[in-house]
Amino acid sequence: MRTFQGRVVAEGTVTAPAVVSHSGLNTLASFQKALQFGDKKASCGDQNNPELYGKAMAGKALCLPRTIGSTTGGLVLYCACSMHRQPACMLFSEPIDSLAAAGAVLADVWLPEVSMPVVDSLGQDFLDYVRDGMLVTVRESGVIEVESYMGRR
Amino acid sequence: MYQTKIALTDEQRAILDGAQGETMAKVMETLVRYGELFGAEKMVPVTGKYNHLVTSFGLKALGSVYDLMDQLIEAGALSGQKFTADPRPLDSNVPSSFLQDLVFKKFMYSRQADYEKQLQKLGLLDANAFTCTCYLPEVGNIPQKGEVLSWAESSAVVYANSVLGARCNRNSGIIDLMGSVAGYVPCFGLLTDEGRRATWRVEVRTSKKPEAQLLGSAIGMKVMEDVPYIVGLDRWLGGRLDESARSYLKDFGAATASNGAVGLYHVEGITPEAVEQGDSLLAEGFRTYVIDDAELQRVYDSYPVIWKNREAQPRLCFMGCPHFSLDQLCDWTDRLEAALVAEGQRRVRIPTVFTASPGVIREFSDTARGAKLRYMGVVLSYICPLMYMNNPLSTRMPVITSSNKLRTYTSARYYTDEEILSILTKGGL
């Protein structure tokens, strides 16, 4: 197991399997299809992100550098939360961008019944280490524990 | 009650503590927490006359956004400024199939009419205030230099910051509205002098005027969210910020903002802060990016074509993302006419839609060029091409464009302006 320290953007603790995007996540392109057509797993609909395309994001520890794309990104994330199709947590290797920050804060302030811990500034090491399916635990104070792949087997 | 490290005024503190009701307190908490993440030390008043919202579409999937807006309306937490909004997603003039119509109206944008009523209650400027180019004179939402804004539409933000010298961060939808409701935005990033300094020096060394959308794409992909200071472009823009240069920078900026995340650029000798401060805008330790013909070709060649059949005949051409200016509509009409005459043709060879704001369309349609464009078979529409394309049915259509923003967010295939002209008039390259 490896531990990483980040900054808490939205509080909470959770354990979930990782799903990883090494390139920026286009929030609108990734979530729109799932929100539009009732996909409870929130399968990624962004054809320009082959690493994530078609994979479930709901209930997963979504590990990414940052979000990119349309400035509707924050409100799309907010909608995913309100429809309970949000990732279990969002873990950013870089400092959070303004669009993802908006989504995280909007969900935290306006949807108190929804939990989606968000931690940023985890560093490139985190993104280099974590793989799809690894079990990730978000602890208090921005500590992230990642179960080693071999350990999981 | 939320405790913040940001130094609030008494009035701001009172709002946060609930003096204007619970909903306003949550609006202020949202803005404060958003600002804290970026190191804001204070909240500053929004000073622009009008706001501009990115959310213009009644997309069924965004139901909770409309619920949130209802909360604001019921609590009387309305926009402190009148506002314009991004383009409408539907226009019956734009070619579409029976199935597309069904999907657009019954599934995707079934909330459009209700949402527009909400916008009117919140403070929409007028019933036709829907365009991404709100800053054009025919629309009239033109911020002054130094004014603080709470906008979100990325192409409008980068234009307002760079060409007009206003101050606005790259906000998300909803945050744009909340800044206007509270009357304050957190002071960080592009609102500060330090945040407006350039960390890249971009040297344009091309042998001809670079395609705006291609140059913007190259710079956006290189600098991402950083601020570039661009030298060597002024000579291609005639050395001054006239109408033609503004149209060029509109398209250039939209490409920097969508292919990267640029919120502000400076063009030496052209944009207001670069004219005033010159290369003193460059921050210590800036990096350099040289763009020549080969680099632009490399960028063009890197664009993926995600059509199932790369050789498919285009079924639709969208031009005007961001919406065309009046100057661009006139220019394109003249170029199309000349090219069609040269080919012995009267009408464009594939269905073609030019998009512009309702204000520009009104000005243009009654002119002789307006009649010519109709005669050549081009549809003029206020639609948002992105909203048209953003569904599985349209994704399967072979659509072409010279907009790098449309290419980036949809399956539309990019061609340069000259290539588009050839396809429209000759039927191919």
Image (cartoon, coloured by chain):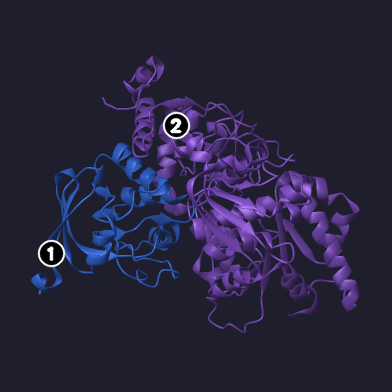
User: Who is closer to the viewer here, A40 or A140?
Assistant: A140
User: Chain in purple?
Assistant: B
**SS at mark 2?**
loop
Residue shown at 43% from the left, 27% from the top: B43
Q: Amino acid at mark 1?
A: Glu
- Residue B26 location (% of width, % of height): 35, 30
Q: Residues within 10 Å of mark 2 (few under 14, many from 20)?
A: many
Circle 2 residue: B187
Q: Check the picture and name the quadrant holding the N terminus of chain A.
A: bottom left
Q: Is residue A116 visible?
A: no
User: Chain in blue?
Assistant: A
Left or right relative to A62: residue B73: right
Q: Residues within 10 Å of mark 1 (few under 14, many from 20)?
A: some
Left or right relative to B276: residue B366: right
Residue shown at 58% from the left, 75% from the top: B301
- Residue B162 location (% of width, % of height): 61, 43
Circle 1 residue: A147
- Residue A98 location (% of width, % of height): 41, 45
Left or right relative to B223: residue B331: right
Give the chain letter at badge 2. Answer: B
Image quadrant where residue B74 sits: top left
User: Who is closer to the viewer here, B215 or B21?
Assistant: B215
